[in-house]
Amino acid sequence: MGWGGNDSVTTGDYPIDVRFTPEARIGRYWGIPVIGHLVRYLLFIPHAFVLFFLGIAAWLLTLVTWIPVLFSGNYPSWGYAIVGGFLRWYMRAASWLLLLSGTYPPFTGAPADDQHVRVHIDEDRPVGRFWGIPIVGIVIRVIILIPHFIVLGLLGILVWFLVLFAWLPVLINGRQASLVYTVVGGYLRWYARVLAYASLMSGPYPPFRLD
């Protein structure tokens, strides 16, 4: 799958990846205290509304995606379209809200190469029939993800602290600081991989790393 552009954050071998463009301009007006945040949150409302219902649809589909996984060992294409589309949309919208992107996210879960945030989902990787065993497969996945939930919870405190000051480099330079991309962006990447694994979209266990 071609990405185009010059991505500053590369991917490893994991089938789920979130890439950012740190050199892209965001716009200093978004860094204006209070006003920039208020306008951004207001513009985010339509996305929050749609993502709420799309998230419900994605959750309901997860209850049946184990069927094709059990019989074929692969996640279904319609699952990638809806559940994977929700993941793409959610990551782009969250990244824009957290000042990691200067391009307003599109109202679609389809791949969009013109965005400062690109969510890559490798649909050609097998998942394994074992994970399609009713109830057992998903329950085991959630249990073995507990260490990730703990680390992400603790890391979320640092992310929250950085987000409080993320407007400063935007206001001064019109770009986001590399530290914010490393920590906040890495947190979103990690979170996306855990969500994908929990919903059976990826086969390999997610790595404990930000990159």
Image (tube, rainbow, N blue to C red):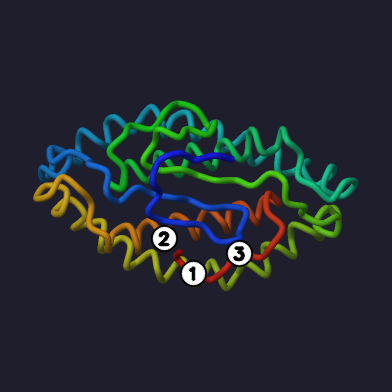
Nearer to us in this view, 122 or 86: 122
Secondary structure at badge 1 equals loop
203 vs 86, left or right, is: right
Query: For the residue carrying disc 2, how many other residues have a C-alpha within 10 Å: few (<14), some (14-19), or many (20+)?
Result: many
The local secondary structure at tag 2 comes to helix
Q: Of the numbered discs in the image, which one, if any, rests on residue 206?
A: 3
Note whether 134 is above or below 102 in the view shown.
Answer: below
For mark 3, does the 10 Å Cα neighbourhood hold few (<14), some (14 to 19), or many (20 or more) residues? many
Residue type at tag 2: Gly
Q: Is disc 2 in contact with disc 1, using a CB cutoff of under 8 Å?
A: yes
- Taking the spot 57% from the left edge, 68% from the top edge, the residue there is 207
Identified by mark 1, the residue type is: Arg
Q: Secondary structure at mark 3?
A: loop
Query: Mark 3 to mark 2: distance in Å?
Result: 13 Å
Query: Number of callouts in the render?
Result: 3
Answer with left or right where residue 109 lies relative to residue 69.
left
Quadrant of the snapshot with the C terminus: bottom left
Marks 3 and 1, how far apart at CA: 9 Å
Mark sitting earlier along the chain (2/1): 2
Give residue 32's position: percent from left, percent from top.
Answer: 10, 42
User: Where does label 2 land, which residue?
Assistant: 186
Kindly identify the residue that appears in the image at 27 percent across and 31 percent down.
Answer: 42
Q: Which residue is mark 1?
A: 209
Front-most of residues 92 and 65? 92
Question: Horizontal and vertical percent for residue 158?
Answer: 32, 68
Q: Are marks 3 and 1 in contact (CB under 8 Å)?
A: no
Residue type (three-letter) at the residue carrying disc 3: Pro
Q: Earlier in the sequence, mark 3 or mark 2?
A: 2
Distance between the Cα atoms at labels 2 and 1?
8 Å
Taking the spot 37% from the left edge, 54% from the top edge, the residue there is 8
Residue drawn at 87 percent across, 50 percent down: 70
